[in-house]
Image: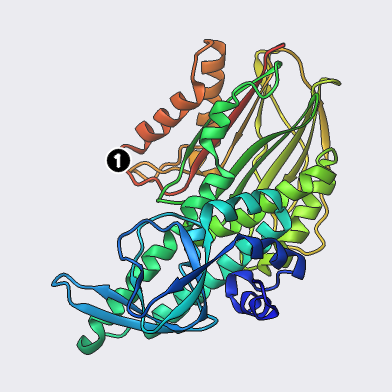
Amino acid sequence: MYSPELTQILKSIKIFAGMSEGHLNEIKPLLKPMQCTDNELVIREGDPGKAMYIIKSGAMKVTRSDEEDDEIFIGLLNAGSAFGEFSLIDDLPRSANVTTIEESELFQLDKKDFDQLLDRDSSLATIFYRNCLTETFARFRDALANITFSQHTLREKNAELEEINKDLSVAQQIQSVFINSEAIEQNRRIHERVRHEFIYHPCIEVGGDFMNIVRIGKDLLAVIIADVEGHGVTASLATGVLKSAFSLLIKTHGDRPSELMTMLNEHFCEVLSKKLFATSYYALIDLSADRIITAKAGHHHPLFWKARNRAFTPMEGSGVGLGILDDARYTQQEYAIEKGDRLIFFTDGIIEQFNPERMMYSHRRLKTLMGDLIIKSEKEISRKIFRDVIHFASGAPVEDDITLLMIEFTR
């Protein structure tokens, strides 16, 4: 069923570019053959996107319907072409109709099957997200280059703009990968000595913040927070690259924070070629030794509440943001922890939020309010912080993603 021609077709599809023979051999068994008659509707505009398709033989036309249900022709697809690729990322409604114009043979790749493959193979996921990022850049450039003010082509260009809007939805699936709120909620007690809570609020539909908590040993927890430059699909795809790298590197470097951060930086520089940068902070929590070991990459230190002193204690260490210098190296710091201590990780979206008078929320306000809430033994502190930020904004737009993660050592 899977001829050498199929390998060449897969290699020619942009979202699979650069994948090894081994990666392609993992994808091939997921492909389901389809036989289509002439004038058969394969994808209907508005239907949920659950799969992508590869044309083995035959041809298709791509169309949209305008408000009067008139057909707008967008293009032709021939053997070797693929369509519906970004349905592997999101399951939003299809933006166009795809209909055969002759008898055709297809392969169908279901999103749910591909999701399972990405979960199993972090290296394949990294290449896939990088390719999605590159393809999105290319689509944006092509669409913008082709848009004119010509009334004659207005309807066709509107269809292209709809395709851009669809591309922006790609980040929704990626968002669920690197900020999986449901999974974190279901795993509130990641360790019997640790309690955590968080807030995550992207300033637009999708964002560039990333946080994760991973148990890498009986008494070892890995915590990371990151903030990719910008917002929207570009930042989201870059964050997907960062998350995939973290998922892979945590297995081999999770117990060495400075090395982990160095490897993340090298990967970020290599994949994104210094087109984007990110700040990040990593903490290894060793509950068997009652200590934390941290590494910083241009990100704010977390607030470190010491229960013994009923006050915050300063944290040290420095390091350049990810994606700026190929050969950046990072140091690590070690701190003792006790019952009642807390770590509060956060991103710029909180402290740099403006109100209508263009005053910033500030690091000082966050620290003061956080300390007051802890002393008063308040519950749901993260939600109270978020409400205070929104109250402070007083209707001013939320200009950056708001992310906060608090970890409390309960015994």
Could you say which is closer to the camera, residue 264 or residue 295? 264
Tell me if 284 is positioned left or right of 55 in this view: right
Which is nearer the eye, 380 or 354? 380
41 to the left or right of 378 = left
Position above or below: 318 against 62: above
Residue at (71%, 53%) from the top-left corner? 122
Question: From the viewer's perspective, is residue 272 above or below residue 369?
Answer: below
The image quadrant of residue 291 is: top right
Q: Is the image coloured rainbow, by chain, by secondary structure, or in one colour? A: rainbow
Q: Can residue 298 be seen in this view?
A: no
The structure residue drawn at horizontal position 22% and vertical position 78%, both measured from the top left corner, is 71
Q: What element carries label 1?
A: loop
Residue carrying label 1: 395
Label 1 crowd (10 A; few <14 / some 14-19 / many >=20):
few
Q: Which residue is drawn at 75% across and 60% down?
A: 267
| Residue at point 29%, 82% (across, down) | 73
- Mark 1: which amino acid? Gly
Quarter of the view holding residue 125 = bottom right
Note whether 58 is above or below 114 in the view shown: below
Q: Position of residue 51 (x, y in %)?
A: 48, 60
